[in-house]
Image (tube, grey):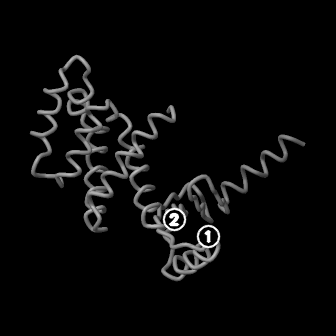
Amino acid sequence: MPTKDIVVLDQLAEALISELPDREQQDRALNELETIADALHGDQSFRDTLLNPALPLAERKKFLRTALEGRLHASTLNAMLMLLREQRLEDLALFIERLRAARLRLAAVRDVLVTSAVPLTEGERNRLLEVLERKWETAVHLREKVDPALIGGLTVRADDWLYDSTVSGRLKRLNQKFANA
């Protein structure tokens, strides 16, 4: 995606976060946007109506308002209308990522995704938070994902930084060494 398009998404994300200074409202907006992204992915008629360039923008806006008004925070609905107007609804998942990043950047918190084969225990989670906060000298927001395909271990991803201690990752690296030998 061109940098210009990312900038548009970042500007919209920062505008939405500034309209929702309360963390609870921001959580609600993120949840609402994720629900809409799921609907766009799972409901073909909803997707076709909103993304149909042959349908006038005014009709698509009316459809979106009718479908979502009263169900969303007004700021979330306005963000959706802006994405529709800017022809960026297909980028909703990326917008949600940029919104998370803007939220954390503005709060000076680093967003970290931890993927493990099994759920982390409370002790593992606390130790990981402690290590990461000490490493980066900032608060860390930990999101967790379970992926049994990792076999064991975990990955820790923050922005463009990745730590991979998974069994599957080790096997891939070992396989690459043999392939290159």
Which image quarter: residue 124?
Answer: bottom right
Instruction: Report x, y in % for residue 141.
Output: 47, 68
> Disc 2 and disc 1: Cα gap in Å?
8 Å
The residue to which callout 2 is attached is: 110
On screen, 172 above or below 86?
below
Q: Residue at x 48, y 61 (%)?
A: 146
Find out whether the residues at labels 2 and 1 contact each other: C-beta distance under 8 Å: yes
Mark sitting on residue 136 = 1
Q: Residue at x 32, y 35 (%)?
A: 89
On screen, 159 above or below 137?
above
Which image quarter: residue 44?
Answer: top left
Q: Amino acid at mark 2?
A: Arg
- The quarter of the image holding the C terminus is top right
Binning the other alpha carbons within 10 Å of mark 2 as few (below 14), some (14 to 19) or many (20 upward) gives many
Q: Is residue 181 left or right of residue 101?
A: right
* Secondary structure beneath label 1: helix
Camera-nearest residue between 158 and 13: 13
Q: Earlier in the sequence, mark 2 or mark 1?
A: 2
Determine the residue located farthest toward the right in the rendered image: 181
Camera-nearest residue between 80 and 168: 80
Determine the residue located farthest toward the bottom in the rendered image: 123
Q: Residue at x 21, y 45 (%)?
A: 78
